[in-house]
Amino acid sequence: MRTGRGVVTLTTIGIVFAIVFALSSFDTPALAASTTITSLSCAPPSLVVMTDTTSQCTARISGAEGTISGETVTFSQTGGTGGASFTSSKTCGLSATSCAVAVTGSSLGQVILQASYAGDANNAASSGTASVTVVQGTTTTSVSCAPPLAEGAMQFEVSLSSPCTATVSGWGGMISGEVVYFSQTGGTGTVTLPSPASCALSTLGGVPSCQITVTGSSVGDVTIEAAYRGDTDNVGSSGATTFTVRFLTTVVGRPFPPIVTTMATTTTAVSPNSFLTVGPTSATTSTNQSSTQFPYGGFGSSKYLILTAVAVVLVAFGAMTWRRRSIPR
């Protein structure tokens, strides 16, 4: 009987161990991670190629369980025909549920960007995409021609040379060294342009500009145009200015009276020895001042008084001499 009881006891213990082993071989099912959604948006949606203009690309995570602030989102370019560069970093740390990075355009075309959230113990990974377009610079060309300062002239005159400067703004990429072309496109007067009538842009002053020199040929209004033809990174543009070329005006062999020329908001006084002229949309007034020149400086001068006194003495002396000769001895 004792032997039988021992067998039963051992059998019972074996069964218990078998059940525990069997139960331990099954994993406890884990709780499912929350499904997240990552959305990405970029503003503005277009960038001028190779400039400092940026687009802010913002990633937002929704559907997350618990706090995800401080977790990382990684950005990358996943497609497109253009190219973009990240200004500082390709990652950002979530503040609450969003964060952003900045991009610039490096080559023309559409750029597909992706934001990826890696997830954590409670949240599944997710990603989202957005696109930006890298475009050409839209340029604006302006031209100005300053009156020559030679011989005191403050106006455009026949046979005198004047500088004409072209400036290009709104550009993208590398524009330094590119060419601007000048031409006379209208007017009743004429100017002589250099050959070739062009100059190469320089960005030394921060804004691309260059200049040529024109010389007045015949009197009348003259319209000068400067044209930038553009390149791969920039759309071409042109601008024009109008001024008047005039002759020297004289009156009885003397220069015309001083002329005051008002152009826009700038007023300049013109030398009496200069030519008569006005610029575009200008109003000109003149004053004729005359004076009489007296010998020895006029009645009030010291020279006149001295000469008068000498004349009086001579007259008195002559009178006395005549009187003595006329008295009989």
Image (cartoon, rainbow, N blue to C red):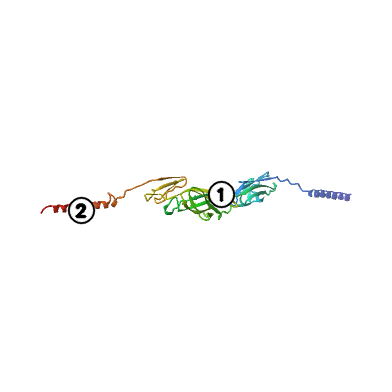
How far from the left and from the top, in percent, is residue 238? 54, 49
**171 or 283: which is nearer to us?**
283
Residue that protrudes farthest toward the left in the picture: 329
How far from the left and from the top, in percent, is residue 4? 88, 49
Determine whether the residue tagged by mark 1 lies in a helix, strand or loop: strand
> Which callout, 1 or 2, points at the residue further toward the start of the chain?
1
**4 or 224: which is nearer to us?**
224
- In this picture, residue 11 sits left or right of residue 252: right
Residue that protrudes farthest toward the top in the picture: 63
Determine whether the residue tagged by mark 2 lies in a helix, strand or loop: helix
- Identity of the amino acid at label 2? Leu
Mark 1 to mark 2 CA distance (whole Å)? 85 Å
Q: Which residue is mark 2?
A: 314
Within 10 Å of disc 2 (Cα), the crowding (few <14, some 14-19, many 20+) is few
- In this picture, residue 300 sits left or right of residue 12: left
Q: Which residue is mark 1?
A: 237
- In this picture, residue 57 sits left or right of residue 253: right
Which mark lies nearer to you, 1 or 2?
2
Task: Tell me which residue sits at (20%, 52%) in the image.
Answer: 315
Within 10 Å of disc 1 (Cα), the crowding (few <14, some 14-19, many 20+) is some
Q: Which quadrant, please, contains the C terminus? A: bottom left
How far from the left and from the top, in percent, is residue 111? 65, 49
- Identity of the amino acid at label 1? Ser
